[in-house]
Amino acid sequence: MSKKLAIIGAGGMAAYHINGFRAAGAEVIAIADVNAAAAAKTAEQHGIAQSFGDVAEMFTALPDLDGVSIIVPNKFHAPLALQAMQAGKHVFCEKPPALNATEMAELKETAESTGRTLMFNFNNRARPESYAMRGYVEDGTLGTINTCQAKWVRRAGIPGFGGWFTNKALSGGGPLIDLLHMIDLGMHFMGYPEPAHVLARTYNDNIDNKAFKGPWGIPDNAEGVMDVEAAAHGFVTFKTGQSMSFAISWAEMNEREECSCIFQGSKAGGMVRRLFGIDGLDETADDSCQIYTTENGLQVNRDITVAQDETMGRERSAANFVKTLEGEETPLNTPAEALALMKVIDAAYASAESGAPVAL
Protein backbone atom coordinates (compact mmCIF):
# COMPACT_ATOMS: atom_id res chain seq x y z
CA MET A 1 0.00 0.00 0.00
CA SER A 2 1.39 3.40 -0.97
CA LYS A 3 2.47 5.83 1.74
CA LYS A 4 0.11 8.69 2.55
CA LEU A 5 1.91 12.00 2.98
CA ALA A 6 1.01 15.61 3.65
CA ILE A 7 2.76 18.91 3.05
CA ILE A 8 3.16 21.53 5.80
CA GLY A 9 3.73 24.85 4.06
CA ALA A 10 2.07 26.01 0.85
CA GLY A 11 4.96 27.96 -0.71
CA GLY A 12 6.77 27.43 -4.00
CA MET A 13 8.98 24.58 -2.76
CA ALA A 14 5.89 22.42 -2.21
CA ALA A 15 5.79 21.50 -5.91
CA TYR A 16 9.18 19.77 -5.72
CA HIS A 17 8.11 17.70 -2.71
CA ILE A 18 4.77 16.79 -4.26
CA ASN A 19 6.35 15.75 -7.57
CA GLY A 20 9.07 13.74 -5.86
CA PHE A 21 6.69 11.97 -3.52
CA ARG A 22 4.36 11.05 -6.37
CA ALA A 23 7.22 9.88 -8.59
CA ALA A 24 8.14 7.41 -5.84
CA GLY A 25 4.56 6.11 -5.62
CA ALA A 26 3.29 7.97 -2.56
CA GLU A 27 -0.10 9.68 -2.23
CA VAL A 28 -0.10 13.34 -1.22
CA ILE A 29 -3.44 13.64 0.55
CA ALA A 30 -3.33 17.04 2.27
CA ILE A 31 -1.63 20.41 2.63
CA ALA A 32 -1.56 22.45 5.84
CA ASP A 33 -0.56 26.08 6.24
CA VAL A 34 -1.33 28.75 8.83
CA ASN A 35 -2.67 30.66 5.83
CA ALA A 36 -5.66 28.41 5.15
CA ALA A 37 -6.44 30.16 1.87
CA ALA A 38 -2.90 29.52 0.61
CA ALA A 39 -3.19 25.87 1.62
CA ALA A 40 -6.47 25.54 -0.27
CA LYS A 41 -5.05 27.23 -3.36
CA THR A 42 -1.94 25.03 -3.49
CA ALA A 43 -4.04 21.91 -2.89
CA GLU A 44 -6.28 22.83 -5.81
CA GLN A 45 -3.30 23.55 -8.08
CA HIS A 46 -1.83 20.11 -7.44
CA GLY A 47 -5.01 18.05 -7.27
CA ILE A 48 -4.77 17.36 -3.53
CA ALA A 49 -8.04 16.50 -1.84
CA GLN A 50 -7.78 18.23 1.53
CA SER A 51 -6.28 21.37 3.02
CA PHE A 52 -6.01 22.62 6.59
CA GLY A 53 -5.14 25.82 8.42
CA ASP A 54 -3.90 23.92 11.48
CA VAL A 55 -1.42 21.01 11.67
CA ALA A 56 -2.93 19.46 14.81
CA GLU A 57 -6.34 19.48 13.13
CA MET A 58 -4.85 17.69 10.13
CA PHE A 59 -3.30 15.00 12.30
CA THR A 60 -6.64 14.41 14.04
CA ALA A 61 -8.59 14.32 10.79
CA LEU A 62 -6.12 12.00 9.03
CA PRO A 63 -5.13 9.23 11.45
CA ASP A 64 -3.74 7.07 8.62
CA LEU A 65 -1.25 9.73 7.55
CA ASP A 66 2.25 8.18 7.36
CA GLY A 67 4.42 11.25 7.14
CA VAL A 68 4.82 14.93 6.37
CA SER A 69 7.21 17.30 4.69
CA ILE A 70 7.94 20.64 6.33
CA ILE A 71 8.42 23.75 4.15
CA VAL A 72 8.17 26.78 6.43
CA PRO A 73 10.50 29.50 7.79
CA ASN A 74 13.49 28.02 9.61
CA LYS A 75 12.31 28.90 13.13
CA PHE A 76 9.41 26.46 12.80
CA HIS A 77 11.33 23.47 11.41
CA ALA A 78 12.18 21.93 14.77
CA PRO A 79 8.83 22.56 16.54
CA LEU A 80 6.82 21.12 13.64
CA ALA A 81 9.15 18.14 13.22
CA LEU A 82 8.83 17.38 16.94
CA GLN A 83 5.05 17.72 16.78
CA ALA A 84 4.86 15.39 13.80
CA MET A 85 7.13 12.69 15.23
CA GLN A 86 5.31 12.79 18.56
CA ALA A 87 2.10 12.26 16.58
CA GLY A 88 3.65 9.15 15.02
CA LYS A 89 4.55 10.65 11.62
CA HIS A 90 7.75 10.32 9.63
CA VAL A 91 9.33 13.65 8.68
CA PHE A 92 11.05 15.09 5.62
CA CYS A 93 12.10 18.65 6.44
CA GLU A 94 13.53 21.45 4.35
CA LYS A 95 16.99 22.76 5.22
CA PRO A 96 18.35 23.88 7.59
CA PRO A 97 17.46 21.06 10.00
CA ALA A 98 16.94 23.56 12.84
CA LEU A 99 18.12 26.95 14.05
CA ASN A 100 21.07 25.41 15.91
CA ALA A 101 22.69 22.20 17.11
CA THR A 102 20.77 22.19 20.41
CA GLU A 103 17.46 22.00 18.55
CA MET A 104 18.88 19.38 16.20
CA ALA A 105 20.02 17.21 19.11
CA GLU A 106 16.45 17.19 20.44
CA LEU A 107 15.15 16.20 17.01
CA LYS A 108 17.63 13.33 16.82
CA GLU A 109 16.67 12.09 20.29
CA THR A 110 12.97 12.27 19.43
CA ALA A 111 13.44 10.37 16.16
CA GLU A 112 15.25 7.64 18.09
CA SER A 113 12.72 7.45 20.91
CA THR A 114 9.68 7.42 18.60
CA GLY A 115 11.22 5.20 15.94
CA ARG A 116 10.27 7.69 13.23
CA THR A 117 12.32 8.37 10.12
CA LEU A 118 13.70 11.91 10.11
CA MET A 119 15.34 13.23 6.94
CA PHE A 120 16.21 16.63 5.50
CA ASN A 121 16.14 18.06 2.01
CA PHE A 122 19.88 18.22 1.41
CA ASN A 123 18.90 18.04 -2.24
CA ASN A 124 22.37 18.54 -3.68
CA ARG A 125 23.24 15.03 -2.50
CA ALA A 126 20.49 13.82 -4.86
CA ARG A 127 21.80 15.52 -7.99
CA PRO A 128 22.92 13.04 -10.69
CA GLU A 129 26.45 14.47 -10.43
CA SER A 130 26.56 13.77 -6.70
CA TYR A 131 25.24 10.24 -7.06
CA ALA A 132 27.93 9.58 -9.67
CA MET A 133 30.71 11.09 -7.56
CA ARG A 134 29.60 9.22 -4.46
CA GLY A 135 29.96 6.02 -6.48
CA TYR A 136 33.61 6.86 -7.15
CA VAL A 137 34.09 7.56 -3.44
CA GLU A 138 32.61 4.21 -2.49
CA ASP A 139 34.52 2.12 -5.05
CA GLY A 140 37.86 3.55 -3.93
CA THR A 141 38.66 5.48 -7.11
CA LEU A 142 39.37 8.67 -5.16
CA GLY A 143 41.11 7.11 -2.17
CA THR A 144 40.85 9.11 1.05
CA ILE A 145 39.53 12.62 0.49
CA ASN A 146 41.95 14.78 2.44
CA THR A 147 40.79 18.30 1.62
CA CYS A 148 37.69 19.98 0.24
CA GLN A 149 36.63 23.45 -0.89
CA ALA A 150 32.91 24.08 -0.43
CA LYS A 151 31.55 27.12 -2.22
CA TRP A 152 28.18 28.74 -2.84
CA VAL A 153 28.70 32.37 -3.74
CA ARG A 154 26.13 34.73 -5.15
CA ARG A 155 26.84 38.10 -6.67
CA ALA A 156 23.27 39.38 -6.25
CA GLY A 157 21.25 36.89 -4.26
CA ILE A 158 19.72 38.46 -1.17
CA PRO A 159 16.30 36.77 -0.88
CA GLY A 160 14.32 39.89 0.00
CA PHE A 161 14.84 42.72 2.48
CA GLY A 162 13.17 42.68 5.89
CA GLY A 163 11.46 39.31 5.45
CA TRP A 164 12.11 36.20 7.50
CA PHE A 165 15.29 35.32 5.57
CA THR A 166 17.05 38.43 6.91
CA ASN A 167 15.65 38.17 10.45
CA LYS A 168 18.05 36.06 12.53
CA ALA A 169 15.37 35.15 15.07
CA LEU A 170 13.37 33.52 12.28
CA SER A 171 16.16 32.26 10.02
CA GLY A 172 19.05 31.46 12.35
CA GLY A 173 21.42 33.44 10.13
CA GLY A 174 22.11 34.51 6.57
CA PRO A 175 23.74 32.66 3.67
CA LEU A 176 25.83 30.37 5.90
CA ILE A 177 22.73 28.61 7.21
CA ASP A 178 20.63 29.21 4.08
CA LEU A 179 23.18 27.88 1.56
CA LEU A 180 24.66 25.13 3.72
CA HIS A 181 24.40 22.61 0.86
CA MET A 182 28.02 22.59 -0.30
CA ILE A 183 29.39 22.22 3.24
CA ASP A 184 27.03 19.27 3.63
CA LEU A 185 28.00 17.82 0.24
CA GLY A 186 31.71 18.07 1.01
CA MET A 187 31.25 16.34 4.35
CA HIS A 188 29.08 13.73 2.59
CA PHE A 189 31.87 12.91 0.13
CA MET A 190 34.41 12.87 2.99
CA GLY A 191 32.37 10.32 4.96
CA TYR A 192 30.92 12.86 7.40
CA PRO A 193 33.99 13.03 9.69
CA GLU A 194 33.64 14.45 13.19
CA PRO A 195 34.55 18.17 13.24
CA ALA A 196 37.39 19.31 15.51
CA HIS A 197 37.87 23.08 15.03
CA VAL A 198 36.21 25.88 13.06
CA LEU A 199 37.64 29.31 12.24
CA ALA A 200 35.33 31.70 10.39
CA ARG A 201 34.59 35.30 9.53
CA THR A 202 31.34 36.92 8.42
CA TYR A 203 30.86 40.12 6.39
CA ASN A 204 27.93 42.51 6.09
CA ASP A 205 28.87 44.50 2.98
CA ASN A 206 25.82 45.24 0.78
CA ILE A 207 23.38 43.36 3.03
CA ASP A 208 21.04 46.39 2.83
CA ASN A 209 21.81 47.30 -0.80
CA LYS A 210 18.84 46.54 -3.03
CA ALA A 211 21.08 46.29 -6.08
CA PHE A 212 22.12 42.94 -4.62
CA LYS A 213 18.62 41.45 -4.39
CA GLY A 214 18.16 38.03 -5.97
CA PRO A 215 15.42 36.97 -8.42
CA TRP A 216 13.74 34.73 -5.82
CA GLY A 217 12.76 34.79 -2.18
CA ILE A 218 9.96 36.76 -0.56
CA PRO A 219 8.63 40.34 -0.83
CA ASP A 220 10.47 43.16 0.91
CA ASN A 221 9.19 44.41 4.26
CA ALA A 222 10.16 47.99 5.00
CA GLU A 223 9.38 47.44 8.70
CA GLY A 224 11.39 44.21 8.86
CA VAL A 225 14.76 43.26 10.30
CA MET A 226 18.15 42.99 8.55
CA ASP A 227 20.50 41.45 11.13
CA VAL A 228 22.22 38.59 9.25
CA GLU A 229 25.50 38.34 7.37
CA ALA A 230 25.98 38.83 3.63
CA ALA A 231 28.89 36.39 3.42
CA ALA A 232 30.77 33.83 5.50
CA HIS A 233 34.23 32.36 4.94
CA GLY A 234 35.97 29.78 7.06
CA PHE A 235 37.98 26.65 7.63
CA VAL A 236 37.06 23.38 9.34
CA THR A 237 39.39 20.68 10.62
CA PHE A 238 38.18 17.18 11.40
CA LYS A 239 39.35 14.67 13.98
CA THR A 240 40.30 12.33 11.13
CA GLY A 241 42.92 14.81 9.86
CA GLN A 242 40.74 15.93 6.94
CA SER A 243 39.98 19.62 6.37
CA MET A 244 37.57 21.88 4.48
CA SER A 245 37.44 25.54 3.50
CA PHE A 246 34.14 27.24 2.72
CA ALA A 247 32.95 30.42 1.03
CA ILE A 248 29.22 31.17 1.22
CA SER A 249 27.53 34.43 0.24
CA TRP A 250 24.36 36.17 -0.90
CA ALA A 251 26.03 39.39 -1.98
CA GLU A 252 29.67 39.38 -2.94
CA MET A 253 31.71 40.59 -5.91
CA ASN A 254 32.05 37.38 -7.92
CA GLU A 255 32.05 36.78 -11.67
CA ARG A 256 28.77 34.84 -11.39
CA GLU A 257 26.88 32.64 -8.96
CA GLU A 258 28.75 29.42 -8.31
CA CYS A 259 27.81 26.41 -6.26
CA SER A 260 30.64 23.88 -6.15
CA CYS A 261 32.37 21.19 -4.17
CA ILE A 262 35.98 20.52 -5.17
CA PHE A 263 38.14 18.00 -3.34
CA GLN A 264 41.52 16.32 -3.34
CA GLY A 265 41.85 12.61 -2.59
CA SER A 266 44.86 10.39 -2.07
CA LYS A 267 44.24 8.72 -5.46
CA ALA A 268 42.27 11.34 -7.41
CA GLY A 269 40.48 14.65 -7.07
CA GLY A 270 37.02 15.67 -8.16
CA MET A 271 34.51 18.44 -8.68
CA VAL A 272 30.75 18.85 -8.71
CA ARG A 273 29.78 22.36 -9.84
CA ARG A 274 26.93 24.49 -11.08
CA LEU A 275 27.63 27.89 -12.63
CA PHE A 276 24.42 29.87 -12.76
CA GLY A 277 23.58 32.33 -15.50
CA ILE A 278 24.32 35.99 -14.96
CA ASP A 279 20.66 36.53 -14.07
CA GLY A 280 20.77 33.70 -11.53
CA LEU A 281 18.15 31.57 -13.24
CA ASP A 282 18.54 27.81 -13.33
CA GLU A 283 17.74 27.36 -17.02
CA THR A 284 20.86 29.29 -17.99
CA ALA A 285 23.12 27.26 -15.72
CA ASP A 286 26.11 25.11 -16.62
CA ASP A 287 26.56 21.88 -14.66
CA SER A 288 29.84 19.96 -14.61
CA CYS A 289 31.29 16.91 -12.91
CA GLN A 290 34.94 15.88 -13.24
CA ILE A 291 37.56 13.55 -11.81
CA TYR A 292 41.21 14.64 -11.73
CA THR A 293 43.62 11.72 -11.99
CA THR A 294 46.67 10.29 -13.77
CA GLU A 295 46.56 7.75 -16.55
CA ASN A 296 49.66 6.23 -18.17
CA GLY A 297 51.79 8.80 -16.43
CA LEU A 298 49.73 11.74 -17.72
CA GLN A 299 47.58 14.26 -15.88
CA VAL A 300 43.96 13.67 -16.93
CA ASN A 301 40.73 15.58 -16.27
CA ARG A 302 37.88 13.15 -16.88
CA ASP A 303 34.38 14.50 -17.54
CA ILE A 304 31.59 12.51 -15.90
CA THR A 305 28.46 12.64 -18.03
CA VAL A 306 25.12 12.33 -16.26
CA ALA A 307 21.49 13.16 -17.01
CA GLN A 308 20.48 16.77 -16.49
CA ASP A 309 18.28 17.66 -13.55
CA GLU A 310 17.01 21.24 -13.45
CA THR A 311 15.44 20.60 -10.03
CA MET A 312 18.98 20.22 -8.62
CA GLY A 313 17.97 16.97 -6.93
CA ARG A 314 14.96 18.41 -5.13
CA GLU A 315 12.47 15.92 -6.53
CA ARG A 316 14.89 13.00 -6.31
CA SER A 317 15.62 13.87 -2.67
CA ALA A 318 11.90 13.77 -1.86
CA ALA A 319 11.58 10.47 -3.72
CA ASN A 320 14.41 9.03 -1.60
CA PHE A 321 12.36 9.79 1.53
CA VAL A 322 9.48 7.69 0.21
CA LYS A 323 11.79 4.90 -0.96
CA THR A 324 13.42 4.89 2.46
CA LEU A 325 10.03 4.45 4.13
CA GLU A 326 9.29 1.61 1.69
CA GLY A 327 12.63 -0.06 2.43
CA GLU A 328 13.72 0.30 -1.20
CA GLU A 329 16.65 2.69 -0.59
CA THR A 330 18.90 3.81 2.21
CA PRO A 331 18.39 7.39 3.44
CA LEU A 332 20.49 10.05 1.73
CA ASN A 333 21.04 11.69 5.13
CA THR A 334 20.66 10.90 8.82
CA PRO A 335 19.93 12.88 11.99
CA ALA A 336 23.49 12.24 13.20
CA GLU A 337 24.87 13.90 10.07
CA ALA A 338 22.47 16.81 10.42
CA LEU A 339 23.65 17.30 14.00
CA ALA A 340 27.31 17.35 12.93
CA LEU A 341 26.49 19.90 10.23
CA MET A 342 24.67 22.20 12.65
CA LYS A 343 27.61 21.99 15.07
CA VAL A 344 29.89 23.28 12.28
CA ILE A 345 27.49 26.13 11.49
CA ASP A 346 27.08 27.07 15.16
CA ALA A 347 30.85 27.05 15.61
CA ALA A 348 31.35 29.18 12.50
CA TYR A 349 29.01 31.87 13.83
CA ALA A 350 30.64 31.69 17.28
CA SER A 351 34.10 31.99 15.76
CA ALA A 352 33.06 34.96 13.65
CA GLU A 353 31.71 36.67 16.74
CA SER A 354 34.74 35.97 18.96
CA GLY A 355 37.44 36.26 16.31
CA ALA A 356 39.00 33.01 17.52
CA PRO A 357 38.87 29.35 16.47
CA VAL A 358 36.17 27.24 18.15
CA ALA A 359 36.90 23.71 19.34
CA LEU A 360 34.19 21.09 19.04
Image (cartoon, rainbow, N blue to C red):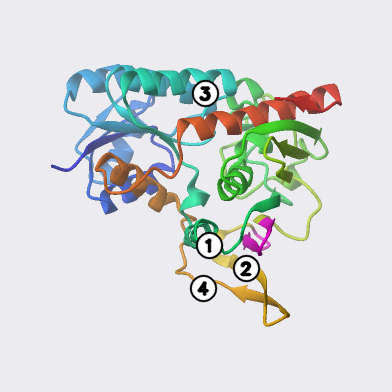
Quarter of the image for residue 57 reads: top left
Magenta stretch prevailing secondary structure: strand
Foreground: disc 4 or disc 2: 2
Give the residues drawn in magenta, as a range.
Answer: 262-279
Q: CA distance from mark 1 to mark 3?
A: 30 Å
List x then y, in percent, for residue 269.
67, 63
Q: Amino acid at mark 4?
A: Thr
Residue identifier under label 1: 136
**SS at badge 3:** helix
Q: CA distance from mark 4 to mark 1?
A: 13 Å
Q: Amino acid at mark 1?
A: Tyr
List x then y, in percent, for residue 170.
58, 23
Which of the marked residues, 4 or 1, is nearer the chain's N terminus? 1
Q: Which mark is residue 305?
A: 4
Relative to residue 309, is residue 191 depicted above or below? above
Q: Which mark is residue 104?
A: 3
Horizontal side of residue 4 vs 227, given as left or right: left
Depth check, front residue: 38 or 202 = 202
Q: Amino acid at mark 2?
A: Ile
**SS at badge 1:** helix
Depth check, front residue: 269 or 52 = 269
